[in-house]
Image (cartoon, rainbow, N blue to C red):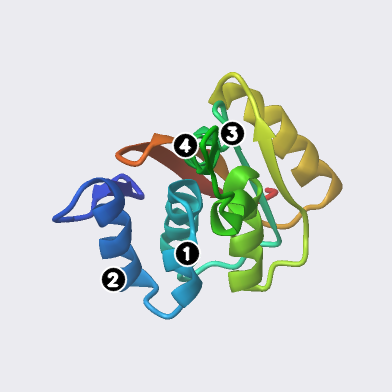
Amino acid sequence: MLLDGQPIAVENTGDKLLVELYRRYAGDYPKFFKMDTLSRLGFMAAEILLQKEKVEAVIFANRSASIKNDTDYLATIAEGNYYPSPSLFVYTLPNIVTGEIAIRHHIQGETAFYILENPEQLEPIVQSQITCCPTPILAGWVECSAPNMFYAKLQIIWNN
């Protein structure tokens, strides 16, 4: 795990890594423990970056939307086992992570989550946002296809 190109020492992997980071960098947002893995990942990546910075918009993307949580939710409505889980259902939308970040950091600008083929497709979207609204933006790729298979690369982008 890197922050500004420098390694951050961690002891855990997967979901336990996200809890470790939460306890180290946030610790005061109990709703974290209700979140799905994608939301936890994006939330914690944002927490680390936004410790000393303020942004006015959040723009994320990935390729798999909320597939990990969608699969978990589907299991609750399987034939012969129909017990839909409201707590899982809310996270079947990938944009929930941008909303959680906006709530936590009082961001009132744009929040968006795009489903794209690759991270390079996000750049023109971010550039168009910078052009129309020259404020700092938290942008990046947040991917989670399984509880222990996730990736986040976020950055704060300023209009220079």
Q: Which element is circle 3 on? A: loop
For marks 1 and 2, the one nearer the N-term is 2
Q: Position of residue 135 (x, y in %)?
A: 73, 57
- Reading the image, the residue beneath label 1 is 34
Q: Which element is circle 4 on? A: helix
Q: Closer to the camera: disc 3 or disc 4?
A: 4
Given the current orientation, which residue lies at the most extreme front position? 80
For marks 4 and 2, the one nearer the N-term is 2
- Reading the image, the residue beneath label 2 is 24
Q: Amino acid at mark 2?
A: Arg
How many neighbours does mark 3 have within 10 angstroms: few (below 14), some (14-19), or many (20 or more)?
A: many
Residue 121 seen: yes
- In depth, the one of 108 and 4 nearer the eye is 108
- Distance CA(mark 3)–CA(mark 4): 9 Å
- Distance CA(mark 2)–CA(mark 3): 28 Å
Q: Position of residue 108 (x, y in %)?
A: 77, 67
- Reading the image, the residue beneath label 4 is 68
How many neighbours does mark 1 have within 10 angstroms: few (below 14), some (14-19), or many (20 or more)?
A: few
